[in-house]
Image (cartoon, rainbow, N blue to C red):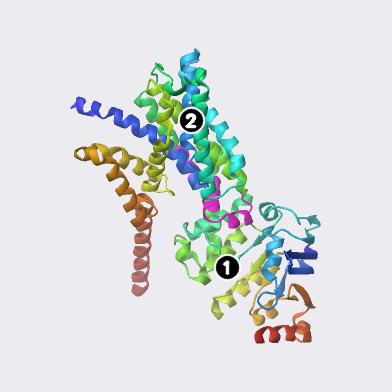
């Protein structure tokens, strides 16, 4: 029995690592920024931690902090030119940013190990640390949702002119969203470095970016539950569909096409909307019956 | 204390949208701004609220120059507006639409908001209660949890007004607030506007319903082709030959 559970530990680790990055992606989308920088920022955090772990004697907790910090600093720098762009232009600019990060990794071979990457990073992060980091992230996201910052993010995403007309600083809040996204990406990048012994530049490529974006699109963009459900489904899918292993990418693509077409708000957001509508209808019926009785 | 527009002009390339407009919106009164379609009424509101750059002239509020201020700064200076083409936040509930209006009065620190500390939670709870108060005042308490995007036009206009009111402005700019409402709803709103003015708020009312405007306003400004063609008390303005010509001419064109 314990063996079967232990068999799923790597899958659980993967789920936590990817969920952290999914929230990094989710928070910028929430604030109305179409950024695809998360994977690039994660690479910065991962390499910061990897270099610290292999070339200095600094302990892992400080390495994790350094990863979060460099991710946040890079995101803040990036938010400045991006504030002038909107929509798909932000997406293009952030994909370019990812390419720059990958090229820099190759260029500074002495520091990053170039195409060979960094090897024999001492493993100091296990499932428990990953769980703690993810739980902390979820708490943060819920807290933000119910605060003035979450409300400002929601307003900016839905209508910038309205948000501005009510005194919401657009550039300030979008920079804040970027900072949070960068810190999360940097932290989970660093966790990945301390968790997986080795780093290679190709692991932070376009495919990773698509995977992270898919978690958010599939799960839902407006509720904290969205990225959790999306990541869980897409991480578990290859396991459930083992017989279809050959056709994994096909199933993945098909699922996304179906969701985008039939549940454009994602699985959880659609369900939440349906539940709310049902509650409203029920209350209305209750109010009407109360009226006819009195 | 008043909102003052002095020699305000706006041109788009060669097209003149406003020329030398002088308007004074005092506190504790409803001031009307009328004119045929395309007269440049919304252009004026957009310039006041920082959504359109001013070509020349000045805008001051209580003596403070806000001509080149950003939309957010202008709101913090005490101005709020509604939109002629309704701009509701469609994905959020009616209550949440109103909550965002309180933004400039929210005081809890960024750290507290990020970490969900008690001060942040208390503030949210407090604002939800105040938003419910506004809903009761506008007769929409039953719609608090409805998705705002699914409401009728009249209700969406009310949500915009509550949202603007939530920022507790000194001046409100209402761009066609009763369009799409029936007489009873309009009457209820007229009552609200009178109460707000009695409470000290300065209101600039843009409206096509002349009867509604003449009843509420002590002072009316009439725009045509971007220029002011008349101003004064309703009884005087409505008899002005230039105003009559503008409206009749407008209908024939």
The local secondary structure at tag 1 comes to loop
The quarter of the picture where the N terminus of chain A appears is: top left
Q: Are marks 2 and 1 on the same chain?
A: no
Q: Main secondary structure of the magenta part?
A: helix
Which residue is at 49% across, 35% downward?
A98
Nearer to us of marks 2 and 1 is: 2
Whether residue B12 appears in this view of the structure is yes
Among the 4 quarters of the image, the one containing residue A164:
bottom right
Which residue is at 58% across, 37% downward?
A78
Within 10 angstroms of label 1, few (less than 14), some, or many (20 or more) residues? few
From the viewer's perspective, is residue B29 above or below residue A154?
below
Whether residue B118 appears in this view of the structure is no
A152 in the magenta segment:
yes
Residue A13 appears at what percent x and percent y? 34, 29
Residue identified by numbered label 1:
B85
**How many numbered discs sit on the rendered protein?**
2
From the viewer's perspective, is residue B140 above or below residue B96?
below
From the viewer's perspective, is residue A144 above or below residue B12?
above
Relative placement, left or right, of B138 versus A225 is right
Circle on res. B177: none
Within 10 angstroms of label 2, few (less than 14), some, or many (20 or more) residues? many
Residue identified by numbered label 2:
A102
Magenta-drawn segment: A139-168
Residue B190 appears at what percent x and percent y? 62, 74
């Amino acid at each position: 029995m314990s063996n079967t559970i232990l068999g799923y530990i790597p899958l659980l680790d993967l789920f936590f690592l990817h969920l952290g990055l999914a929230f990094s992606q989710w928070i910028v989308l929430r604030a109305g920024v179409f950024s695809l920088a998360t994977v690039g920022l994660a690479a910065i955090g991962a390499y910061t931690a990897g270099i610290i772990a292999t070339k200095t004697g600094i302990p892992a907790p400080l390495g994790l902090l350094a990863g979060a910090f460099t991710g946040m600093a890079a995101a803040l720098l990036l938010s400045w030119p991006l504030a002038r762009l909107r929509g798909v232009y932000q997406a293009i600019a952030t994909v370019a940013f990812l390419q720059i990060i990958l090229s820099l990794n190759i260029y500074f071979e002495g520091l990053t190990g170039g195409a060979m990457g960094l090897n024999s990073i001492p493993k100091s992060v296990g499932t428990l640390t990953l769980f703690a980091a993810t739980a902390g992230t979820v708490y943060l996201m819920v807290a933000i949702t119910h605060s003035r910052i979450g409300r400002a993010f929601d307003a900016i995403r839905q209508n910038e002119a309205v948000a501005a007309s009510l005194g919401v600083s657009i550039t300030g809040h979008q920079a804040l969203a970027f900072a949070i996204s960068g810190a999360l990406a940097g932290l989970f990048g660093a966790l990945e470095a301390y968790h997986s012994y080795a780093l290679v530049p190709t692991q932070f490529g376009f495919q990773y970016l698509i995977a992270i974006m898919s978690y958010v699109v599939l799960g839902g963009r407006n509720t904290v539950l969205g990225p959790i459900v999306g990541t869980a489904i897409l991480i578990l899918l290859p396991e459930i569909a083992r017989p279809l292993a050959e056709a994994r990418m096909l199933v993945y693509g098909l699922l996304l096409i179906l969701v985008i077409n039939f549940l454009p708000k994602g699985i959880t957001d659609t369900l939440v909307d349906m539940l709310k509508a049902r509650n409203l209808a029920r209350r209305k019926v209750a109010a009407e019956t109360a009226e006819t009785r009195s | 204390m008043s909102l003052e527009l002095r020699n305000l002009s706006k041109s788009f390339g060669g097209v003149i949208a406003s020329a030398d407009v002088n308007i004074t919106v005092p506190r504790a009164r409803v001031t009307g701004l009328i004119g045929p379609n395309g007269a440049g009424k919304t252009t004026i509101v957009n310039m006041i609220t920082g959504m359109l750059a001013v070509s020349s002239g000045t805008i001051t509020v209580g003596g403070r120059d806000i001509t080149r201020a950003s939309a957010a700064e202008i709101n913090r200076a005490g101005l709020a507006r509604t939109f002629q083409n309704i701009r509701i936040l469609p994905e959020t509930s009616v209550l949440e639409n109103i909550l965002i209006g309180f933004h400039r009065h929210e005081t809890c620190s960024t750290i507290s908001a990020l970490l969900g500390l008690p001060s942040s939670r208390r503030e949210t709870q407090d604002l939800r209660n105040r938003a419910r108060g506004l809903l009761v005042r506008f007769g929409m308490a039953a719609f608090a949890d409805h998705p705002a995007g699914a409401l009728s036009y009249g209700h969406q206009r009310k949500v915009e007004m509550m949202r603007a009111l939530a920022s507790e402005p000194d001046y409100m700019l209402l761009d066609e607030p009763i369009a799409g409402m029936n007489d009873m709803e309009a009457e209820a709103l007229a009552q609200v506007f009178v109460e707000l003015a009695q409470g000290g708020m300065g209101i600039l009312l843009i409206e096509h319903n002349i009867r509604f405007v003449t009843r509420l306003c002590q002072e009316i400004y009439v725009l045509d082709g971007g220029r002011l063609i008349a101003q004064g008390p309703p009884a005087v303005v409505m008899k002005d030959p230039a105003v009559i010509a503008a409206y009749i001419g407008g209908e024939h064109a």
